[in-house]
Image (spheres, rainbow, N blue to C red):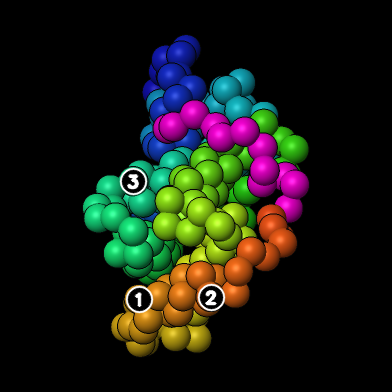
């Protein structure tokens, strides 16, 4: 079968992610993805930096997909934060292979390709700072740990339970706690304090 000589680089991640979600995070092959894109496996490496580059492209597409899901959450204040936590956990449960890609394909903090993951953090931070200006960064960091931990539990030990049961109460308690204790030191690592990236 003849292969066209050009692939739109912007489509590699999303289309490769579709293959991963169909085959499984641990089961996909380079040949499957190359076939989806209409190129030979060797030609695919002209567009990504080897297998590592392809893996990061897949994870980036997953990160942008989660970012889009969070942007779709309506409401304001605490209700918005609860809705985003629900969306985060539901994404992990409903799209487990995309979530695995998001977690396992993340590049180093100083790698420019980390932008999609950084965009997730900045969206969360900006939303939290509207609700808790005094402790927005610290509370946002704790909230992210809560949502991510709940997502991992829902995919593993708690996978037979309602994925978001009790999550709203946990988010409200977290917010109330940070409101009550006054200003606290910011625990956010320096790598997450970079300037906000562009939207997807």
Contact, mark 3 vs mark 1 (Cβ under 8 Å): no
61 or 45, which lies in front? 61
Mostly what secondary structure, the magenta segment? loop
The residue where tag 3 is placed is 71
Camera-near label (3 vs 2) is: 2
Instruction: Answer with mark 3 or mark 2, whichever residue precedes in sequence.
Output: 3
The residue where tag 2 is placed is 180
For the record, the magenta segment spans 189-200
SS at badge 1: helix
User: Residue 17: x percent and y percent?
Assistant: 43, 44
Q: CA distance from mark 1 to mark 2?
A: 18 Å
What residue is drawn where x is 44% and y is 85%? Answer: 158
Q: Is residue 189 visible?
A: yes
Residue 137 located within the stretch drawn in magenta:
no
29 or 101, which lies in front? 101
Q: CA distance from mark 3 to mark 2?
A: 28 Å
- Determine which of the numbered discs, if any, sits on residue 135 in the image: none
From the viewer's perspective, is residue 162 above or below residue 6?
below
22 or 181, which lies in front? 181
176 or 5, which lies in front? 176
The residue where tag 1 is placed is 168
Instruction: Answer with mark 3 or mark 1, whichever residue precedes in sequence.
Output: 3
Instruction: Answer with mark 1 or mark 2, whichever residue precedes in sequence.
Output: 1
């Amino acid at each position: 079968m003849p292969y066209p000589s050009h692939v739109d680089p912007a489509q590699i991640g999303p289309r490769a992610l579709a293959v991963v979600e169909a085959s499984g995070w641990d089961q996909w092959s380079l040949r499957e993805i190359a076939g989806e894109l209409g190129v030979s496996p060797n030609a695919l490496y002209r567009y990504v930096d080897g297998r590592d580059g392809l893996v990061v492209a897949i994870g980036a597409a997953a990160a942008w997909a989660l970012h889009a899901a969070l942007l779709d959450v309506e409401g304001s204040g605490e209700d918005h934060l609860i809705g985003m936590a629900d969306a985060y956990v539901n994404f992990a449960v409903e799209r487990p292979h995309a979530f695995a890609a998001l977690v396992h394909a993340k590049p180093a903090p100083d790698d420019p390709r980390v932008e999609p993951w950084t965009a997730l953090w900045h969206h969360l931070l900006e939303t939290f700072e509207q609700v808790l200006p005094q402790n927005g960064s610290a509370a946002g960091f704790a909230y992210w740990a809560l949502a991510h931990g709940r997502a991992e539990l829902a995919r593993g030990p708690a996978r037979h339970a309602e994925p978001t049961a009790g999550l709203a109460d946990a988010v409200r308690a977290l917010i109330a706690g940070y409101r009550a204790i006054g200003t606290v030191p910011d625990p956010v690592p320096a790598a997450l304090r970079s300037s906000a990236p562009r939207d997807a």
